[in-house]
Image (cartoon, rainbow, N blue to C red):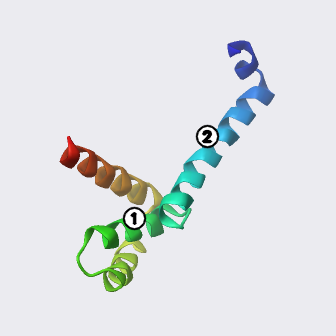
Amino acid sequence: MIAGLLNPRGLLLTLFAVLVAVFGSLYLAYGQADPCRALAVEKARRSDFGALAERIARMQTSQMTTASCAGGLLDSWGERIAHYW
């Protein structure tokens, strides 16, 4: 099993599977594969204003890098987990 992951084909297939899992889960959870748009949806869901909040959040996240949006999503998920534990 591990020897199969060390060859180039196995490594590429593993990397592809991880990317499909990450972007697929983003799409299933938020209807978006882009981390910045997913962060805007997440912010809107956590606010009291719904669709209006999503428009404002999209304007805010449009100025962010993909890495900072992904970090914001991870922070938001961490806050949710901490809230329930």
Assign a secondary structure to mark 1: helix
Q: Quadrant of residue 73?
A: bottom left
Instruction: Give the residue pinned by disc 2.
Output: 18
Q: Quadrant of residue 36?
A: bottom left
Residue 82: percent from left, percent from top: 21, 44
Q: How many angstroms separate mark 2 from mark 1 (CA)?
A: 20 Å
Q: Residues within 10 Å of mark 2 (few under 14, many from 20)?
A: few
Q: Residues within 10 Å of mark 1 (few under 14, many from 20)?
A: many
Among the two numbered marks 2 and 1 on one chain, the one whose residue lies closer to the N terminus: 2
Which residue is found at the position 54% from the left and 59% from the top?
28
Say which quadrant the N terminus sits in: top right
In the picture provided, is 76 more to the left or to the right than 40? left
In the picture provided, is 61 more to the left or to the right than 47? right
Which residue is found at the position 73% from the left and 13% from the top?
3
Q: Amino acid at mark 2?
A: Val
Instruction: Give the residue pinned by disc 1.
Output: 39
Residue 66: percent from left, percent from top: 47, 60
**Foreground: 24 or 72?**
24
Which residue is found at the position 34% from the left and 76% from the top?
57
Q: Residue furthest bottom?
A: 52
Q: How many marks?
A: 2
Q: Amino acid at mark 1?
A: Leu
Assign a secondary structure to mark 2: helix
Residue 6: percent from left, percent from top: 71, 19
In the picture provided, is 3 more to the left or to the right than 65? right
| Image: 33 above or below 16 | below
| Image: 76 above or below 3 | below
